[in-house]
Amino acid sequence: MISKNIKSLVESPSAGVIRKMFEEGAVLKQKYGEDKVYDFSLGNPDLDPPQAVVDAIKEYAQDTSHNCHGYMPNAGYPQARQAMADKSAKEQGVSVQKECVVMAVGAAGALNSTLKALLNPGDEVVVPCPYFTEYDHYIHNHGGEIIRVKTKADFGLDPQTIKAALNEKTAAIIINSPNNPSGRIYTDEEILAVVDVLKEHGKKTGRYPYLICDEPYRAITYGKKVAAVFPKYEYSVVVTSFAKNLSLPGERIGYICVNPACPESKDFIAAAVFATRVLGYVNAPAFFQKVIAKTWDCECDYSLYEKRRNELIEVMDYAGLEYAMPEGAFYLFVKVPQGWNDDDLAFTNHLKNFNILCAPGSAFGGAGWFRIAYCVAESTIINSKQAFYNACHSK
């Protein structure tokens, strides 16, 4: 018999809403033609991987050395861990050793291993809204409860709502910067304010919540840098991947890096390594550990994403839609127009009548908004202009 819990999740209206939109798009494209369907549902980067990555793939594909496809230590190849430690040191501005790194099966695998390592049954994880919808499942996977907190009007972190959510069960807070779906990058001042709250809570209760930074979009920014967390808070962890910045979403390669200053760093790494075995990952893909160890710092050009953002903004302005200006990633979070009572699901269903596919904001804890993924062909953005206008001026 199928698990009752999973069955109820599968049958719930919000289950896999983004993937469902993506699949509906495939059907519409067959019916009307690709050029007449405007699919903004899925954050699937359409830029090709950089040439250095392609060259490394070719190089390692020709490797016929003995045991080149065999097991390695669960934490990953030493050279891959060292490369990620070097990357983390560059981003965080502190010295990082390879022993602080665990290679993972994408950012999702990294986050699941991290939560498995940290959570006891009934522990709580605070998540500012809007947030990546899969956090619900990842937290519940390991016996935790998600505690959603409001952000400010500009989607900035609100230390007061975070403070009010903390209690003796709080194990961690997850922040995602640049944020999916809002594109918001949290400032140094915002991070410091949250850190002050976490430190105060830790001193009072003896339990310091971990600050988990989910950073797959860290490199894709438009003139604003992502704040470093390691110098600000000892109990901090970065989980990330190369899905977005190197356009490798299907290869499932990422890593965990714990702050070397964390008093529990050795225990945390041991737990995270063991979690990869308990969860059945065993190790991150061997082939792509080698690829990203060699290419993590290769040159990448994200200017096309900024160009598409600006083109999409022109479309939104023409249609009369309000939106939050994204500072990074490749999503535009748009306000449901007046007359729809903030019903984002009803409005995104209405958009389908005009062959437009977008994800409802309620799937991200952002009711009254919807998300447009602009990692698509420019022609899709430009050709959607009249369709968006017509959708917004009819009901």
Image (tube, grey):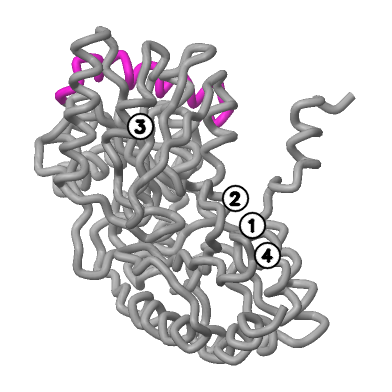
**Quarter of the view holding residue 35:** bottom right
Relative height, residue 191 to residue 374 (above, below): above
What is the CA distance from the residue labelled 2 to the residue labelled 3? 30 Å
Q: Which residue is mark 4?
A: 22
Nearer to us in this view, 353 or 381: 353
CB within 8 Å, label 4 to label 1: yes
Q: Secondary structure at mark 4?
A: helix
Q: Identify residue type, mark 2.
A: Ala
Taken as a whole, is the magenta stretch helix, strand or loop? helix
The label on residue 102 is 3
Q: Nearer the viewer, mark 3 or mark 4?
A: 4
Nearer to us in this view, 127 or 276: 127
Q: Which residue is mark 1?
A: 18
The x, y position of residue 27, in whole percent, is 79, 73
Q: Nearer the viewer, mark 2 or mark 1?
A: 2
What is the CA distance from the residue labelled 1 to the residue labelled 3? 29 Å
Q: Quadrant of the C terminus?
A: bottom right
Q: Identify residue type, mark 3.
A: Val
CB within 8 Å, label 2 to label 1: yes
The x, y position of residue 370, in whole percent, is 55, 63
Q: Residue at x 29, y 32 (%)?
A: 237
Q: What are the residue bounds of the magenta stretch?
A: 261-282
Q: Which residue is mark 2?
A: 363
Q: Identify residue type, mark 4.
A: Phe
